[in-house]
Image: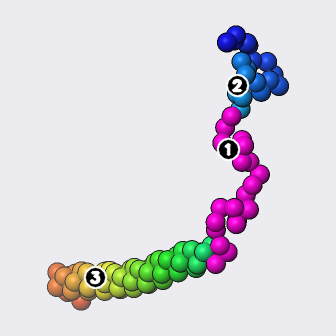
Amino acid sequence: MQTQSLRAGDRLVGGLDVLDDPAERHRGDLRMDHARVQAGDVEKAFEQRLQRVQAALQHGQRLLSAIIEEVAVLYWVLVIRNFVIALIYLYQFSKTHGSEESPV
């Protein structure tokens, strides 16, 4: 067999189809019945995925609510802590200085 150099536009080289690619041969035949896919199968798969996404979102919402609740509790714990520290400071100040001066 004699070999030839491939030029632009050549499909046959030495009697062989150089573009003998299954994807090339079957391109354009993308009908659902050709792939044996039923519309109901696609809809069922879509519904299943949608249910999984909705469940994940609901879980995320519950998690976010719990986080917000914890942050609110932490905020009030810090407010109360700071108030107690201020009371302790005022108490200690009043013991050391008596009623002669006010820290404010």
Residue 26 at x, y = what percent? 71, 48
In which quadrant of the rendered image does the N terminus lie?
top right
Helix, strand or loop at label 1? It is helix
Q: CA distance from mark 3 to mark 2?
A: 85 Å
**Where on the picture, by quarter, is residue 22?**
top right
**Where on the picture, by quarter, is residue 24?**
top right
Classify 10 Å Cα crowding around label 1: few (below 14), some (14-19), many (20 and above). Answer: few
Residue tagged 3 = 81
The question of residue 1 being in magenta is answered with no
Foreground tag (3 vs 2): 2
Residue type at mark 1: give it.
Ala
Q: What residue span does the magenta drawing correspond to?
A: 20-40
Q: Give the overall secondary structure of the magenta segment.
A: loop
Residue at the spot 73% in from the left edge and 22% down from the top edge: 15
The question of residue 36 being in magenta is answered with yes
Q: CA distance from mark 2 to mark 1?
A: 17 Å
Q: Is residue 2 left or right of residue 72?
A: right
Residue 37 at x, y = what percent? 64, 68
Residue tagged 2 = 16
Residue type at mark 2: give it.
Leu
Foreground tag (3 vs 1): 1
Q: Are marks 2 and 1 in contact (CB under 8 Å)?
A: no
Which residue is nearer to you in this view: 79 or 52?
Answer: 52
Instruction: Specify the farthest residue to the left.
Output: 95
Residue 77 at x, y = what percent? 31, 84
